Image (cartoon, rainbow, N blue to C red):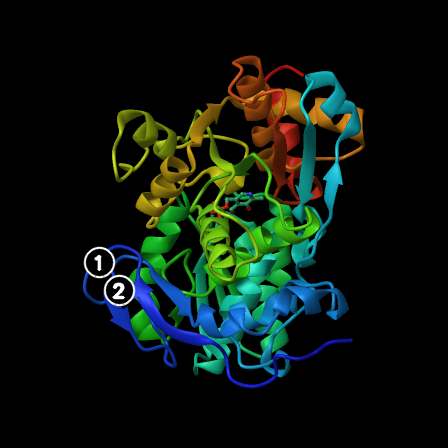
Amino acid sequence: MDLEGAGMSYVEKLQCGSCREEFPAGRLWSLCPDCAKPLLVRYNLGAIRELDLRGRLANRPPDMWRYLEVLPVDSRDEVITLGEGFTPLLPMPQLTRKYRVRQVLTKDESLNPTGSFKARGLAAAVTMARKLGARKLAIPSAGNAGGAMAAYAARAGLESYVFVPCETPDANVLEAEILSTKVELVEGVITDAGRLVGERKDAEGWFDLSTLKEPYRIEGKKTMGYEIAEQMEWTLPDVILYPTGGGTGLIGMWKAFDEMEQLGWIGSTRPRMVAVQSDGCAPNVDAFFKGKEHAPAWPSPVTYAAGIRVPAAVGDFLILRAIRESGGCAVAVSDRETYDATSEVGRAEGLLYCPEGAACWAAFRRLRAEGWIRDQDRVVVFNTGAAQKYTDFIRKFQASSGE
Ligand SMILES: Cc1ncc(COP(=O)(O)O)c(C=O)c1O
């Protein structure tokens, strides 16, 4: 097996995604010290291009660290891993036929450690936090990120502090209770949990792993973009539907496509990126249609798709930029549509989508009916987590809607 890549990382610097100011990697960073926007990792892609890495991937382990040279670590030895990544890209033959499109595929992220795609970002972020000297990690979470952070922190021998809204699926809370140093239930939503972490982190000595408030979660998440390209034999789909809360996955994939083009692995054609939100919490959809660069916080967010109950995102401008540059769009669906979408995918394909994934399927149906998704399109739909973690939320939705 090819475990090459042992040596120094190809990271050149960190760069602010907004003001473009540059900073040296090699120490812990949070937001850009100049403008308080997210920092992004920049690599020496010219040097990586020389390696003929794409040709060597076939002999590497089937996890996200197979793309080692475009990840921030020096070698596999320092990686905190539970086997995350390289999830299946599953054809959906019945639904492809029913909706008369060229192809529909599910990127099934439910098979990751801790049952969601959050494993990717947190594997990378915890690895880097430990390497750069953090000992106590804190995270505000809608549920899945908290469990993932706790798992990787435990694996790394670090303390972990998880802040989740009171209204969080019980499986997420239980998981974090078992794996973390401490879980706190917070009145309100994820942004209220984030405020608490922000207020207490200095006194407690916590390093804050909030979405996009450190540079490395996005590096883990971007591997979804590399995988889709590799699994589609170095082509990209025409459309990607992604359930968007903080938007790390969408921003990460957009970054991955750019990197891959610079590496000579793909051409300049991009998928139309679709940010899917709930109509009970749709700040980015609203901003997209109003032509805004930033998304004002959504008042009183409500949806049983807990992971997209995110009223404000620090990377909103990066989400909106990626959607617009790709020629994509943003869609808000109701919980009713989401619930119906779960049944359709489940019965047709045997795949039990989590509510966030089902929201994407609901958006697919809408966009197909409107003709925005075309006959000749190849479409990737993200199922970002395991439905089994939401049994209490799904039951509650059933009861409230008279199911
Ligand atoms: C299952 C699931 N899907 C989607 C999301 C939204 O992800 P992001 O914040 O990266 O946009 C979350 C976030 O908690 C989640 O848990």
Residue type marked 2: Cys
Q: Is residue 95 left or right of residue 179?
A: right
246 over 103 or under it: above or below: below
Residue occupying the point 66% across, 58% down: 85
Q: Is residue 345 left or right of residue 280?
A: right
Q: Which residue is mark 1?
A: 19
- Dot 2 surroundings within 10 Å: few (below 14), some, or many (20 or more)? many
Visible in this render: residue 372?
yes
Q: Secondary structure at mark 1?
A: loop
Q: Secondary structure at mark 2?
A: loop
Give the mark, 2 or 1, whose residue is nearer the N terminus. 1
Q: Is residue 216 left or right of residue 32?
A: right
Point out residue 112 in the picture as x, y percentages from the top left corner: 68, 55
Residue occupying the point 66% across, 53% down: 230
Point out residue 311 in the picture as x, y percentages from the top left corner: 36, 39
Residue type marked 1: Cys
In this view, the mark in front (2 or 1) = 1
Total numbered circles:
2
Say if mark 2 contacts mark 1, CB within 8 Å. yes
